[in-house]
Image (cartoon, helix red, strand yellow):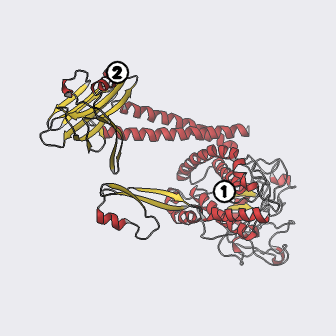
Amino acid sequence: MRTGRIVMFVIGCLLMLIGLGLAVGAAAVGVFNAGQGDDRYLSVPEEVYEVDSYALIVPDLEVNGVRSEDQVATLQVQGEPTQSGQELFIGIGPSDEVDRYLLDVQYSELQEVNFRPFRAEYEEVNGTRAPAPPGEQDFWAEASSGTGEQSLEWSLEEGDWSAVVMNADGSRPVSAELQVGARSELLQPVTWILLISSIVFLVAGIALVVIGSSGLRRHPVGPAAVGEQQGGPGQPVGPGQPVQTSGTPQTYGQMQDRYGQGQQPGSGYRPVRPGGATAAGAAGTASAGAVSAGASGGAGVRVGVRDPGLTGPRYPVRLYGEIDPNLSRWMWLVKWFLAIPHYIVLFFLWIAFFVSTVVAGFAILFTGRYPHGLFDFNVGVVRWSWRVTFYATRVLGTDRYPPFTLDRTDYPADFSVDYPRQLSRWLVLVKWWLLVIPQALVVGAFSEAAIVVNRFYVSGGQETENWTGMVPGGRWTDAWENGWESTPDVVSSQGLSLLALLVLIAAVILLFRGSYPRHLFDLIMGLNRWSYRVLAYAALMRDEYPPFRLDQGPADRRDEAAELGRPDLEPGPTTGAGRR
């Protein structure tokens, strides 16, 4: 039943994604329809086309399944000769007739046009004779000829056509300012079809997501309520788990919430240390918001956010990973290939993750709560992705193949987030794109490759390419002095990121020494931990801003002090978060 609900949820997310795509398509087509307006055309920029031959043609304009009376679309060609007094001819005719007319005539076929900067590429066809004036031919479907500006309008019709621009007297060279446009009466009905289809897909997808998300909720830990499983209310759930102070069963997410509430001054909530002793220990009573670990070696170390040995609060997003002491020297060379089945599944899961995050964003905006089923699903997707990342790419910390599941397991890599009982309604509007920018810049600095800008400019009639990114001065001064027509930028990523470089160094050391450097592993884990905290924040899972802090090691020491850092799952019939 649970598997069926998950499948229903994923299908719903995919339907919603299709609906969103159709909505975007409807908006785009609507913009084009508004742009053409009444009796107007969507046109390319007007430019000067010059050839030394007798004719400029655009060959092989294939039209299939359209009759001219259908008025599917209309093509407009406007032109004006650049030489004063010269008569210009513009015509559209069947390709075979045009080929016979220009047989053994030198002409130029337009192959490609770029407008930023403008550049037209032609293929020259040689010939030995001059053509007869084009206006004397009777095969043209539409034609316009004369001095001054000429305009041709042609309704698309099935066939193979060619557009021809010539001097009216058949002389050469040909030089004219040309502009091509098109309009279609189908854009408006297509807009409505796409819009209605998007609404249908979105409604169906939302319905499936709502129904399916109920099957993604975590089941209570164990076959019965936690209190019954442990012998009644007030008994510890396990090492490091909170005391059940009432008879109400708790899921793992609720236990995490209870822990977070216990960090507030005056809560009276007491975590349990290993062995069942409370953290109040020898001190007897807890101070406001913190308790001493009297049963943990008598050292009096405070837990959670009050640990005096640590700076800053415990962040409610936990990333765990423990290095395998018996890593293979060479297996990291093929892990990326072995993980391909995971990549295929994750491709669809991340699509569902995106859609469910959008749905959750609207839910937070109107209710202030993140739907529990969507939250568990999204955390599960990130958890799955982290296990694959830990295994194959950004850590290489274990040779154990990742499981195909969203749930927590005993795998040596884990990700979890405290479920928020309440979220800010207005913060959801800005945190995922505006507030996250400083964190995204930091994360991008160590997780993304260097950005290089290739700048192209036209100088002296020749196109030149210069690498100007990250080089003071570059060649911009030369371009300015010589004069440029335009400077389009091509941005690309080159080289390795800092994180990828560190993982590569660790892999090479592992290959030759047979061991993974522990300090390097701790640093890599810290960088990944920072990245995943930012991901959780941008995915609307928490309102607390991620700390600008590099918490190295398998787990954050603050989480370890609170017995929340390392999973200690016991075997049992759990389908949700599992037991620590």
The residue beneath circle 2 is 67
Position of 304 with respect to 457 (left or right) is right
Q: Residue 7, how many percent across, how many down?
A: 67, 38
Q: Answer whether residue 495 is visible to the viewer in this image.
A: yes
Q: Specify the quadrant that holds the N terminus.
A: top right
Residue at point 27% right, 25% down?
101
For the residue marked with disc 1, what is the amino acid? Tyr
Residue 485 vertical placement versus 471 (above, below): above
The residue beneath circle 1 is 419
Q: Answer whether residue 565 is visible to the viewer in this image.
A: no
For the residue marked with disc 2, what is the amino acid? Arg
The quadrant in which residue 418 appears is bottom right
Query: Callout 1: helix, strand or loop?
Result: loop
Residue nearest the viewer, comparing 215 with 468: 468
Residue at point 86% right, 55% down?
230
Position of 394 with respect to 272 (left or right) is left
Residue nearest the viewer, comparing 270 with 222: 222
